[in-house]
Image (cartoon, rainbow, N blue to C red):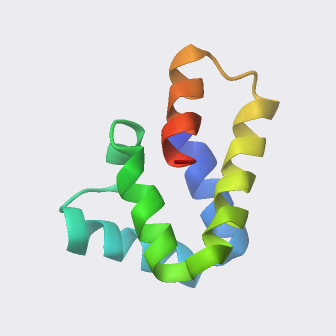
Amino acid sequence: LVVLAIEKTLLEVGKATYDEVLGKLYEDYGCYLADCYEKPEYLAHVLEELYGPNHVIIIESIKKYLAETGAQEDISQFIIKISE
């Protein structure tokens, strides 16, 4: 569910954004989008590095999508970590 929210949000921004984030995740951390559930700080760092202060808009969109799905405790922890 978390990975779907991330994918949906990035693709809404644009395919180029999606590809750029995936490439940077692999380049910097050797990981894929699915790994961001366990390591949300990786995604947060990549978004901040690529988009500066505007990364907050993407994070807020992910959080909104997850809230609409009735996030459970483990998803709530993901939201807290990605927002740090």
State which quarter of the image contains the N terminus: top right
Q: Residue at x 75, y 28 (%)?
A: 69
Please, is residue 55 above or below residue 51 in the view? above
In the rendered image, which quarter is residue 54 located in? bottom right
In the image, farthest residue toward the left: 30
In the image, farthest residue toward the right: 68
Q: Position of residue 14 (x, y in %)?
A: 66, 78
In the rendered image, which quarter is residue 7 located in? bottom right
In the image, farthest residue toward the front: 84
In the rendered image, which quarter is residue 23 located in? bottom left
Judged left or right of residue 27, residue 4 is right
Judged left or right of residue 5, residue 30 is left
Q: Residue at x 33, y 43 (%)?
A: 39
Q: Position of residue 17 (x, y in %)?
A: 56, 79
Number of numbered discs visible in the structure rendering: 0
Q: Position of residue 34 (x, y in %)?
A: 37, 45
Q: Position of residue 66 (x, y in %)?
A: 70, 36
Q: Residue at x 57, y 48 (%)?
A: 83
- In this view, the residue in front, 11 or 50, is 50
Q: Residue at x 67, y 63 (%)?
A: 56
Please, is residue 68 above or below residue 51 in the view? above
